[in-house]
Image: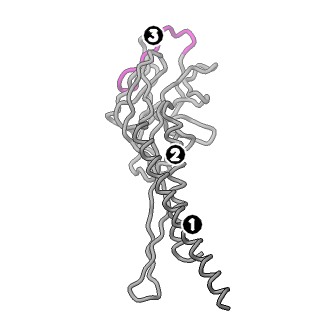
Amino acid sequence: MDLPGYVALTRQSGLLREMQSVANNIANLSTTGFRREGVVFAEMVEALAAEGGSVAMTAARGRYTDDLQGALAQTGGALDFAIEGEGFFTVMTPAGERLTRAGAFARSADGEIVDMDGNPLLDEGGGPIVIPFEAEHVGVAADGTVSVNGEPVAKIGVVTVEDQTELFREGGVRFRAEGGTIPVEDGRIVQGFLEQSNVNAVAEMARMIAVQRAYEYGQKLLDGEDDRIRLVVRTLGQQA
């Protein structure tokens, strides 16, 4: 394969990753707390031996997360929480602390508030939040204060990161903060609501069609290059 083929191949590889990202977004249209993901392309330009000549290749070097807040849907659940504004809930997983916007929680057999995978929701001090079994009413104030039968028992921690490049996605709705977290002062928790996915179905479908067409154009270029090389080989073989 000659140089044009390699250039087209790097573009095809990047478009494949972008299509995978689009497909994942569409699959999570109804996932609570899911945030749309995109692909970041980088261009590498290198000078050629010919004077004034250069070649540019592309690569999907990284991914980014769209931090646009999703719509809030009312559920009425006492342990369904949503964050208005920036910030994340913190849950303790077997791999360590992870951040999430998915606020569908329940009470474990031990009385702890846990997510759907059984990971405890952490308070502002980094400890699990326990609801006594005799609790008749659980309330959560806008600042995250959890009250049981009118008495405060804990305060949900809402955190964020200073550098968004140190926030890595794990498991769809969970994120790992490499550089640590900081408290969010103006985050507002709403009880009885869940944040919906921020994926726009129409925009993602349009993006999928655009990526698919770009991939088809690249494939036509590769096919054309292959035909050209075969023609050159046949021509030189006939002259030999």
Give, as a three-letter code, the residue at label 3.
Asn
**Quarter of the rendering occupied by the N terminus:** bottom right
At 42% from the left edge and 44% from the top edge, which residue is drawn?
A: 206
Tell me the SS state at disc 1.
helix
Q: Which residues are magenta?
A: 132-144
Q: Quadrant of residue 239?
A: bottom right
Main SS of the magenta part reads loop
Residue 94 position in % (x across, y down): 63, 38
> Could you give the CA–CA distance between mark 1 and mark 3, rounded to whole angstroms?
71 Å
Going from N to C along the chain, the mark reached first, 1 or 3, is 3
Q: Which mark is residue 169?
A: 2
Foreground residue, 14 or 181? Answer: 14
Q: Which mark is residue 149?
A: 3
Location of mark 1 (residue):
223
Going from N to C along the chain, the mark reached first, 2 or 3, is 3
Would you say 119 lies left or right of 187 here? right
Task: Select label 2 or label 3 by which is in front.
Answer: 2
Residue 103 position in % (x across, y down): 48, 28
